[in-house]
Amino acid sequence: MYRAAKDTPPCLDNATFAGNVEVQASKGRGRGLFTAKDVIAGELLLCEKAFSYCSSKHSKTSILINTHTSQATLGTQADLITDIVQKIFRSPSLMPVFTSLYHGDYEPVDEAEVDGMPIIDTFLVNRIVSFNVFGCPRTSLENHSAKSTSESPHHTCRIFIKASHINHSCYSNARRSFIGDMQIVRATRNIPAGSEIVFWYAIPGPNYTYEKTQEKLKNWGFQCTCAICQQSKKIKKNVSSKRLALLEALKAAFGNRTSADLPKAERILNAVEKTYTELATDLPRLALWHPYLLLTRIYCSKNQQDKVIETAWKVLKSLGFKIKRQNPLSLQSPFEIEQWGLMEDCLT
Ligand SMILES: [Zn+2]
C-alpha cells in the first residue's frame, strides 16, 4: 500500500471495508457513525476509499465564485468541486450518495433532470464540500515521522462518504490515518456495539479552553457539548484563574529545560491536580499530560529511571488511562490496561 501511495494520483487497488460501522440518527446532531458490534481498542472500524480526490501538486489553480454567498473557492478545493460535479454528471446514480451529506441550511433544487440530462446543483456541491472536505497528507506515516518532502502536510483534498458521518467530540474514541486515497479509522478505546464513533475536528491540545474550542468549531456551525466541554463550561471562575496562574508559574519553573527547577515543577503540578474535581479516569485532565510529558523527557535526559516511570504513568493517568501494575517502579513489570484514555497525537 505504501508503494502504491507514492504514485500520482495515489489511487490504491483496495476496496472500502465498513462492516463494523453503520450510519444512524445521532441525537441533536443529525446523523452519526455507530459501531455495529463491540470493538476493542486498536480494532479497525472503517477503511474507506475517497469518493473524490484532488492534489495541490496538480492543481489547475481554479477559482470558483459562489454567486449565492459571493465567496470564492480557490485551488485544490475548487478542483475537487469540479471533479465531483463531473463525476456525478457522468454517473447520476452517485448523486443521492453524495447529496445526503450534511449541507447546513442550504435548500437544494428539487428537479433532478431536464430533457433527460441530470441537473447538478453546484451550489449544493460547494456547500457539501465546505462542510465535509478532508485536508490530508499523502500518508499519515510520512507526516508523523516528519520526513521532509516538498509537499505540504495537507496537500490533498478529499471527500469520504462514510467517514463524513463521524461527528466531533473532544473526548474522541477513534483515530484516523491516511494512505493514498484511503482513510483508515481505528478505535482508540473499547467501544460497545451501538455507540457513536467520534473524533475531534479541532484537537483539544494542552492549551485547551472551552472558548478556544468553540471558536475553532464555529465554521462547522455547532458547539461541542462533550463531557470535557460541559465540565469546562461549568468550572468556577476562581478555579480556572487559579489553574491558569499555576500553569504560568509552571512555565517559569521549567524555564529553558536545562535550568528547570524540577521539585518546584512537581509541586505546582500537584497543585494543578487539586483544581480538578472529577477523577481523571472519568474525564481527562488536559492541562496536565503535556507538562508531565516534559517532565518525563527531562528526567530521561538525566537518566533518572524511577522518575521517568513515575511521570510517564502520570501522563497516561492524566489522559484517562487506568493501568494495573504489579510493580509500579519497574519497567519490566507486567501491566494491564483496564481503561484506555485519550489518544493525543504526539503520544502515538
Ligand atoms: Zn468538547
Image (spheres, grey):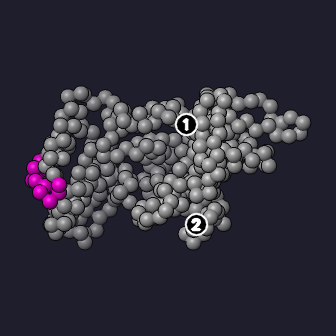
* Residue range corresponding to the magenta coloring: 256-267
Residue under pointer 1: 26
Is 306 displayed left or right of 38 in the figure? left
**Looking at numbered disc 1 in the image, what kind of residue is underneath it?**
Ser
Residue 278 lies, in percent from the top left, at 27, 39
Q: Quadrant of the C terminus?
A: bottom left
Locate residue 17, reporting x and y percent: 62, 58
Q: Is residue 307 left or right of residue 43?
A: left
Depth check, mark 1 against mark 2: the one in front is: 2
Residue 48 visible here:
no
Q: Which mark is residue 110?
A: none
* Cβ–Cβ under 8 Å for marks 1 and 2: no
Look at 41% across and 33% down and name the residue there.
215
Residue shown at 23%/69% (left/top)? 331
Instruction: Determine if residue 28 is in view.
Output: yes
Q: Quadrant of residue 112?
A: top right
Disc 2 target residue: 5
Q: Residue at x 43, y 37 (%)?
A: 216
Real-space Cα distance between discs 1 and 2? 34 Å
The disc, 1 or 2, on the residue closer to the chain's N-terminal end is: 2
* Residue placed most toward the observer, 159 or 34: 159
Is 287 on the left or on the right of 65, as rendered? Answer: left
Residue 123 versus residue 184 in the image, above or below = above
